[in-house]
Image (cartoon, rainbow, N blue to C red):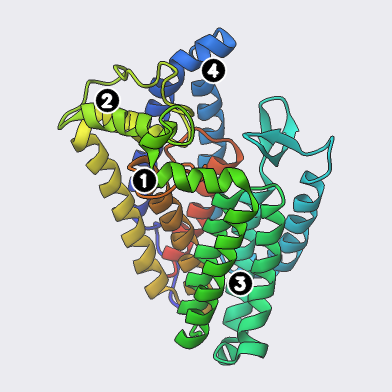
């Protein structure tokens, strides 16, 4: 076991803080008009973002200095708690409905999303399970099926809310961990085929999902309905040009583009800061993911390697889906951009997970 470093990965830490600062700045710029209209306070979303960003940074500093191996012991209790929260949130009168999904627990505008918590917990539990039973992973029944059942159960409960976007991030990060752990390609290909069939079934089972697909494929057939968000997002990105309209000068945030401070904040960023601003944010994400991959490779044990892989996979999948949606490559899924979008529990938990990743870097070989 290598000795602990005097400091965590500097590049990962700096890129995280820079993305967080850009996020706070863009949340205010994107939400000021909406916040004044809805709450009479143009700083409403900014103040919430600052509160959760500060809490998240404190949590990141704490987890950055706590030996990551302690999470192995907390994996099972955390998993049980996560599933209990997923059950509680589905109870009418307790779970809060926002954006058409019963996915929140809390009071008024403050609350937590159990689905965000379960993502982190599943990653920790899979890292523990796969590192302890790595020799069995090539066998479907004893090695591959147990983690699949856990992921499938969590995904199914998230879909009862329903929240396809968060479920997709959970499955994506989990499958990456299972692949890195040594699962057979044949098994994964069969699972992928099964997943595609299941996804088609989920889309056909809910009319609003099918409407999102048709709106994505043919947005101009229904510009005021299913295609509205994609069209308005492109209207924001296009005029940004090379250097943008200027910070605070977005036109689409004036109630044209829905959710400008969350799902479509990258559209506002591209409109105000242009191609250069968009590339800068993507570059910072690439730096973050590169350092995360390096940490996973250099981790001193398999648990640390798989834990780092899961965290990096979670961030990567979420970034790819969000950017893909705002530029019209994917249907609208309701996924936020990590560290940039307005968030409560999601922002705090993301920074907490990054603190764990930074701690693993302190033990890297």
Point out the tag, 3 or 4, that comes first from the N-terminus.
4
Q: Position of residue 96 (x, y in %)?
A: 74, 35
Q: Secondary structure at mark 3?
A: helix
Q: Which mark is residue 193?
A: none
Point out the tag, 2 or 1, that comes first from the N-terminus.
2
Mark 4 or 1: in front is 1
In this rendering, position of residue 164 left or right of residue 360? right
Q: CA gap, disc 1 to disc 3?
A: 27 Å
Point out the tag, 4 or 2, that comes first from the N-terminus.
4
Please identify the quarter of the rendering in which residue 132 is found.
bottom right
Q: Which mark is residue 44?
A: 4
Point out the tag, 4 or 1, that comes first from the N-terminus.
4
Residue in the foreground of this view, choosing between 159 and 336:
159
Q: Which mark is residue 323?
A: 1
Point out the tag, 1 or 3, that comes first from the N-terminus.
3
Point out the tag, 2 or 3, that comes first from the N-terminus.
3
Which residue, given by chain and number where applicable, does mark 3 sit on? 126
Q: CA gap, disc 3 to disc 4?
A: 38 Å
> Can residue 301 be seen at all in this image of the molecule?
no
Q: Position of residue 105 (x, y in %)?
A: 74, 38
């Amino acid at each position: 076991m290598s000795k602990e470093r005097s400091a965590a990965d500097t590049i990962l830490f700096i890129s995280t803080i820079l993305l967080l600062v850009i996020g706070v700045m863009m949340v205010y710029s994107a939400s000021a008009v909406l916040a004044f209209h809805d709450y009479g306070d143009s700083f409403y979303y900014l103040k919430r973002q600052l509160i959760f960003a500060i809490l998240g940074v404190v949590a990141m500093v704490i987890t950055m200095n706590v030996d990551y191996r302690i999470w192995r012991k907390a994996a099972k209790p955390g998993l049980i708690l996560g599933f209990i929260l997923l059950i509680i949130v589905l109870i009418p009168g307790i779970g809060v409905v926002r954006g058409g999904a019963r996915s929140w627990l809390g009071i008024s505008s403050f609350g937590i999303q159990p689905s965000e918590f379960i993502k982190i917990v599943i990653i920790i539990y899979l890292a523990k399970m796969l590192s302890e039973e790595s020799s069995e992973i090539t066998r479907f029944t004893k090695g591959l099926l147990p983690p699949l059942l856990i992921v499938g159960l969590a995904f199914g409960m998230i879909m009862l809310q329903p929240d396809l976007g968060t479920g997709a991030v959970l499955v994506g990060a989990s499958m990456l961990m299972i692949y890195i752990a040594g699962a057979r390609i044949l098994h994964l290909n069969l699972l992928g085929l099964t997943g595609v069939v299941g996804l088609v079934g989920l889309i056909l089972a809910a009319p609003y999902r099918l409407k999102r697909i048709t709106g994505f494929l043919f947005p101009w057939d229904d510009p005021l309905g299913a295609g509205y968000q994609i069209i308005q997002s492109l209207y924001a990105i296009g005029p940004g040009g090379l250097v943008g309209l200027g910070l605070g000068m977005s036109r689409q945030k004036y109630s044209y583009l829905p959710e400008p401070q969350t799902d479509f904040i990258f559209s506002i960023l591209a409109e105000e800061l242009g191609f250069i601003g968009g590339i800068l944010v993507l570059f910072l994400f690439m730096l973050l993911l590169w350092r995360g991959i390096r940490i996973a490779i250099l981790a001193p044990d398999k648990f640390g390697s798989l834990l780092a892989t899961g965290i990096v996979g979670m961030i990567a999948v979420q970034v790819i889906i969000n950017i893909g949606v705002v530029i019209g490559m994917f249907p609208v899924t309701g996924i936020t951009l990590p560290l940039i979008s307005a968030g409560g529990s999601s922002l705090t938990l993301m920074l907490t997970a990054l603190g764990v990743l930074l701690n693993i870097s302190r033990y890297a070989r």
